[in-house]
Amino acid sequence: MNIVVTVKQVPDTWAEKKLDASDKTVDRKSVDNVMNEMDEYGVEEALKIKEAHGGEVTVVTMGPDKAVETIRKALSMGADKAVHLSDESLHGSDALSTSAALAKVISTLSPDIVITSSEASDARGGVMGALLAERLGLPQLTQARKVTVDPGAGKVSVERLADNGYALVEASLPAVVGVVEKINQPRYPSFKGIMAAKKKPLTKLSAADAGLDAGSVGLPAAASTVLEAQPAPPRQSGTIVKDEGDGGAKVASYLAAQKLI
Amino acid sequence: MAEVLVLVEHTDGEPKKVTAELLTLARTLGEPSAVFLGGPGTYAKAKDYLAQYGAAKVYLVESEDIADHVAAPAAEVLSKLVADTSPVAVLAAATPDSREIAARTAARTDSGLIWDATALTADLTATQGIFGGSTIVSSKVTKGTPVVVVRPNSTAPEAAPSTPAETPVDITISDAAKGAKIVDRVVEAKSGRPDLTEAQVVVSGGRGLGAAEHFALVEKLADTLGAAVGASRAATDAGWYPHQNQVGQTGKTVSPQLYIAVGISGAIQHRAGMQTSKNIVAVNKDPEAPIFEFADYGIVGDLFNVVPQLTDEIQKHKAG
């Protein structure tokens, strides 16, 4: 199995995130950056598929030079090699042009399966799996909480989350699979894994190397624009009362006064 | 007047409330055209609802090709309608399925995509609360037909009865779009409670509950209020409640009239998913819990005393 998994470096989940004042893109300089937490589930699922069926896991990311830290983490977890699409001109790309750029890189790897996660914690679009499937012309098996691959039959099936349960979805390989949080328990990189990661092949591509048209990427090519951004007005703390045995009744009175019951 | 395409959000034809919200919003932008995509025989359940909320037209596809495949066939239909009708905008609900269809439609029509809008002006400037609502952004699509994914509970639905013209869409879904086939649907938990993201009231439980079985307290309070049940990440990580119900940065975003947080500290992870709720009530035994910094009403106390009493009092109030 030739397995490709996409990852993204994002501001730390626990950091207060901001937009850069100058160009209104996500401020990645003033915060610690980490592998998007959801992507750990994607990497883990890729490794599990490799362990069950053999093959190779290639990590693909697009991002600034320092996103190499996130590649290293995926390699430390056990991925075999990586492709890093990195170019100043890509800065400010929207989800649509990012998906086109990633699809271009991924198609050169001729994958049997492409794994993404449900969303990145900075942009929270939840659309990359769908967009990659669209761009690559492959079946879309997103919102997956369980993935079963049958390489012999050239099939993959997933349990796709629904409001009250799930849908069982099947497709022929190659396909794009998007996994949700908690599909598995992502492993921690071992010391051995961290040492080994340093020697694993990493290909760095510029936009030109990847064959991307300069006019199709980056902030100028984005199909939407942020006109204005400001901090939300702070939410004021209201009435806080210590329970003296009548706390429940007090909440009920509050709700009644607000006409909420 | 120019058309606004509204992707109808429904379950087997049964429209969801967000559909009425989208039609109401669409009327401020132009002439709303509902796009109903579902399985054979499902439209009958949506017909009157779409008329009640002012759809001027309904574009219709009832087919197994739509119902039994993920996202791509619906995007194919919607993209064709964008090409055929040159609408001022396409509106879809911020649900997992519709946002995927919207994204693929934007890609296919070379258009811009905005997600999680909470408002949209007549000149198509969208408001979004990003980073869990901590930053408010106004944004605009600059290319193609604006495809805007709108959060449930963003617009108050207003009825405007109409007699929509029904137009079946003449389309053959491509084989390529039928790559991901739904072969079975399994209902695991039919709670009878409203959808978490659509609910007017949400009651959520967290670490303070201490055990899965104590979620019964939260559920009882929720059912007294006709509310949806949410859970903090700590609670779903512990396996006390299903992941689908997780509210927060790595879960669902909700914006109900009333949000009751039970035994939830209110760290940024959770706050990011609920801080735009209109009224926030918190019960927590720790007076230093961050949730009290932004709750409208808080009780510092033992939830095992406060919550059952609250449930009783609400029942009395309703009976009274």
Image (tube, coloured by chain):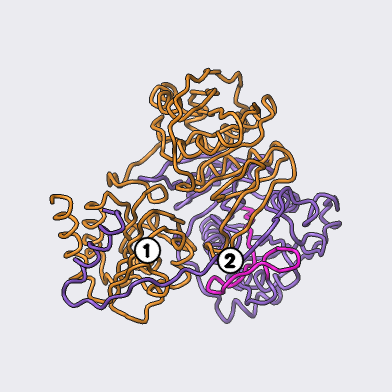
Chain colours: A purple, B orange
- Residue A238 among magenta residues: no
Q: Answer yes or no: is residue A113 visible.
A: no
Vertical placement of B154 versus A68: above or below?
Answer: above
Question: Would residue B53 be found to the left or right of residue A226 on screen?
Answer: left
Which residue is disc 2 drawn over?
Answer: A36
Question: Would residue A228 be found to the left or right of residue B60 on screen?
Answer: right
Task: State which quadrant residue B174 falls in.
Answer: top right
Q: Which residues are magenta?
A: A1-27
Instruction: Check residue B280 in the rendering and tell me which mark sits there, or answer none.
Output: 1
Question: Would residue B8 be found to the left or right of residue A93 on screen?
Answer: left
Q: Are marks 1 and 2 on the same chain?
A: no
**Residue A121: percent from left, percent from top:** 56, 63
> Circle 1 marks a residue in which chain?
B
Observer-nearest of B292 and B104: B292
Residue located at (40% from left, 24% from top)? B48
Q: Answer yes or no: is residue B263 visible.
A: yes
**Residue A240: percent from left, percent from top:** 32, 75
Vertical placement of B265 versus B225: above or below?
Answer: below
Q: Which amino acid, mark 2?
A: Asn
Residue located at (59% from left, 41% from top)? B102
Instruction: Check residue B299 in the rendering and tell me which mark sits there, or answer none.
Output: none
Observer-nearest of B186 and A254: A254
Observer-nearest of B289 and B62: B289
| Secondary-structure class at tag 2 | loop
> Circle 2 marks a residue in which chain?
A
Residue located at (70% from left, 70% from top)? A67
Which SS does the magenta portion mostly show? loop
Question: Would residue A15 be found to the left or right of residue B216 on screen?
Answer: right
Residue located at (48% from left, 71% from top)? B268
Vertical placement of B25 versus B127: above or below?
Answer: above
